[in-house]
Every structure is written in structure tokens, then in C-alpha cells.
Image (cartoon, rainbow, N blue to C red):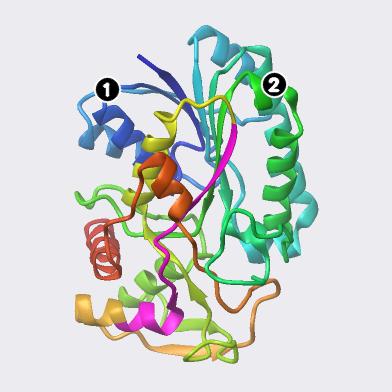
Amino acid sequence: MKKILVTGGLGFIGSHAITSLLDLDYDIFCIDNCSNANLNIISRINKISSKPFIFRKISISDQALGEFIKANEIDSVIHFAGLKSVGESVNFPAKYFYNNVIGSKILLDNLKKYKIKNFIFSSSATVYGNPLFLPLKETHPIRATNPYGQNKIDIENMIINDSYFQTECSVKILRYFNPIGAHSSGIIGESPIGIPNNLMPYILNVAKKVYSKLLIFGDDYNTLDGTGVRDYIHVMDLVQGHIKAIQYNRLGITIFNLGTGQGYSVLDLVSTFEKVNGIKIPFKVIDRRPGDVDSVFADPSEASNFLKFKATRNLEQMCHDSWNFSIRNN
């Protein structure tokens, strides 16, 4: 029986991962500093899964982390914790470096100290920067265009260049594309604190008339309709990728894209949401955000070949499940 520590476990992806891991009868230990998550997520997870989990409100940089790992005899770690807004990272690069990179360095030191043998790092497709070719393969050059993406590169490099992770631990670096959607129960979903940084939560707030219109950052990209193209993946598919990764025990470091292999534009997502849910989403185009790129979508073949993972939920289901969560949680 694996004892899995999930960092940032009350966040969007972390909370969904915990529900699925509990369903598989793993023993789950969760930490989160709650900088972008609410404690009520704990009770929501408990409504979905009958198996309890242990939570402690601490940061990955806290001294108490090592004591928590030792006391609970953790053998596997999934590392979700971190600040994640591309735009905010441009405005506050030092804050992002300290929280994401330095915090992860402290976590990695604890993993080595307590001989953790199974580790998953939540990386991002932002490490690829402005693509030289599409679809993106794991061998694509690494060259971030924003501090958030550079944080992910810095953390990846700390892992890749460490002999412990090279030879004594099964490490899976998972480069996510764009997770949206929600748990089918509608009990948990993406619920950021404050003004949303991601596209789907913003659409949901427009649909609920919290905001009068959606602001689209640029319509002059080199894409079919001029808006940015991304590889949207249902959060529950993304979670399945983590389950496959936790069960993949090859020693050393492997890197996998987790995406669908299909790109959709901002306007594609808006029109699909309108069609599926019968709600008009007014929008206004404004200037581009610094660091954004034209088009990004995955070549998911490595994950398919080695993890036996393939995303199965389409854009319509992502839009349906996102709205289902939103209307159940006003």
C-alpha cells in the first residue's frame, strides 16, 4: 500500500487527484498553504470519497514538512504546489522564484533525506516557450517566455541534475497542457480565489453575470481565427495520467506530455461552451498578455506508449462539467 503525499492538494488538480487516489484505496496525506485554495475543499472531497485522508496546513518550504514525511512514513510524493499565473509571474518574478523554485528545492531535499522512491512533478507545457514545431514532443528545446515557465525549467533541472533522482528514485516529470472541466459530481472543480487567471473560470463568471464580458487577450495571433490555440485536457483525464505515472515504477527520470494532441482556440472554447450550455458569452478583445504564444498542443505518444495513458473526454464534456460545477456552487 503506497502512502502518498500530495502537495498543493486542495488546489484544482490536486483535489481531483486525491479523490481518484482515495477511490483506489491509497493512503493520502495532503499539505497546502491555502494561498489559492479554501479549507472547505476538504469536506467536499470527503463527500465524494468514503475513505478519509490526512491534511495539514503547511507549505513545502516549512520546517515541519520533513517531520510530516517522517511521521507518516511517506513513500511517494506528487508535487502540485506552486503559484501558477503566467501574467502574475511577469509582474512578480521574485515572488514566483522564491515560492516555486526555492520551495521546491526544500521539498526535494526532504525527498532525498527520507529516501522517497516514487516522485511525480507537476510541470507545464510553458517550458517549451514559443514552439519551433507542432505538435510538441518532449524532446523540443526548452526555452520559456515567462517567469512561471522558467520556474518549471529550474525545478526540472534541479531534479534532472541530481544523482539521487537519476539512480535511486522513480521520477515522472509531467508536462501539463491546459486542464479544464470538473468532477462529474459537480462537488469539486476549478474555484480560484480572487479574479481568475485561467480562461474557463473567467468564462464561468461571465456566464453567471459576475462579469459583464470575457476579455480575450489578443486576436492577432498566427492561428485560424486570430486567438490563441491551446490543448485543453479534462482534469479527470489529467488525473488518470497521474495514476498511471504513480504505478510506473521504472527507476530514473522520465518526462511525459499530458495533453490530448488537439488544439482549440479561445473562440473555439467560447463557442463550444455556448452550444453545450445554451448561454451566450459576450466578449471584448484587448491587448495580448506578455509571454503568451500563438499555438501550443501536445504530441502525447510517449505517455500513450509508456504509461498506457490516453485522454478520452472531449471539449464538449469539459464545458459541460465546468458549468455543472459552477451552477452547483454559487
Give the numbered dot on residue 189: none
| Rendering coords of residue 239 (x, y %) | 37, 44
- Per the image, is 268 magenta? yes
The answer to whether residue 213 shows anywhere in this view is: no
Q: Measured along the vertical axis of the image, is residue 301 above or below residue 239?
A: below
Badge 1 amino acid: Asp
Q: In this view, does 52 lie to the left or right of 284?
A: left
Q: Quadrant of residue 98?
A: top right
Looking at the rendered structure, the secondary structure element under dot 1 is loop
Question: What residue range appears in magenta?
Answer: 253-271
Looking at the rendered structure, the secondary structure element under dot 2 is helix
What residue is disc 2 on? 164
| Rendering coords of residue 39 (x, y %) | 42, 37
Q: Nearer the viewer, residue 250 or 265?
A: 250
Q: Which tag is nearer the camera, tag 1 or tag 2?
A: 2
Q: Quadrant of residue 314?
A: bottom left
Alpha-carbon neighbours of circle 1 within 10 Å: few (<14), some, or many (≥20)? some
Give the numbered dot on residue 25: 1
Residue in view at x 59 percent, y 79 percent: 294
- Per the image, is 232 magenta? no
Residue in view at x 28 percent, y 86 percent: 280
